[in-house]
Amino acid sequence: MLRASNIRKLASSAQVKNINPWKFVEDILPPIQIPTPDMNQKFPTPTGWQPPSPDLQTFDYPYFVERNRFHELDLVEEERSTEFFDLNYDNRYQDKHDIALRRRNPSDDMPVTHLYNCSGDIFQLRNEICAYLEEISGEPVAGQADEPEARITVTGKYSDFIRDFLYDKGF
């Protein structure tokens, strides 16, 4: 039977002091850095990813789209609701978000696609993206460039088309 005095003796022994206590924790922790992709494989990969063009510096675009830390273009699709809560309703005694969910009409939601990490002349990039999407879809596409957020937003779910457009440009 282990007693407190035996545990203290065991803990103070040289055998326990020589063990690195973090060794087992470090084995299960994920790597701190994202590994660099293997450039000796065939591109695009089965997932559709491809690296930036090696001669991107020579293209001389007035804009630039950076990739995120996972080496991907930062594209996000979302459904933006048209109303968050009814301002004319007396909601002093109820949670306004509960009222919003109750009165919200999901058919009024508008799909939008965001492209993040844009720099340079993002208004020209927005115009080129919108022209490309209008050519593909045959419908007018509204776009918004937000310089402080380094973001371009277009109406519709077009992340795959925008990704292909940027890959063709070399980004």
Image (cartoon, rainbow, N blue to C red):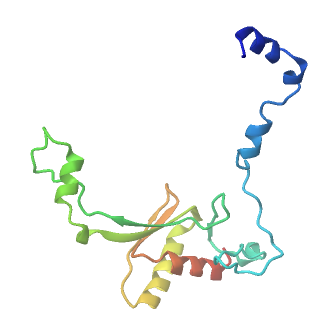
In this image, 93 relative to 79: left or right?
left
Locate the N terminus and report the quarter of the image it occupies. Answer: top right
Residue 164 position in % (x across, y down): 58, 81
- Which is nearer the eye, 139 or 70? 70
Residue 71 against residue 143 in the figure, above or below: above
User: Can you say whether 161 is above or below 65 in the image?
Assistant: below
Q: What's the residue at 52%, 78% (across, down)? A: 160
Foreground pick, 75 / 147: 75
Q: In the image, what residue occupies the spot 73% across and 80% down?
A: 43
Q: Is residue 22 above or below residue 73?
A: above
Residue 71 is left or right of residue 96, and the answer is right
Quadrant location of the C terminus?
bottom right
Q: Quadrant of residue 14?
A: top right
**In the image, what residue occupies the spot 62% across and 71% down?**
62
Residue sitting at x 72%, y 73%: 51
Residue 89 percent coordinates (x, y): 10, 49
Viewer-nearest residue: 25 or 52: 25
Q: Looking at the picture, how far across and down is residue 26, in whole percent? A: 76, 41
Q: Residue furthest top?
A: 5
Count of residue discs: 0
- Residue 120 at x, y percent in the picture: 59, 65
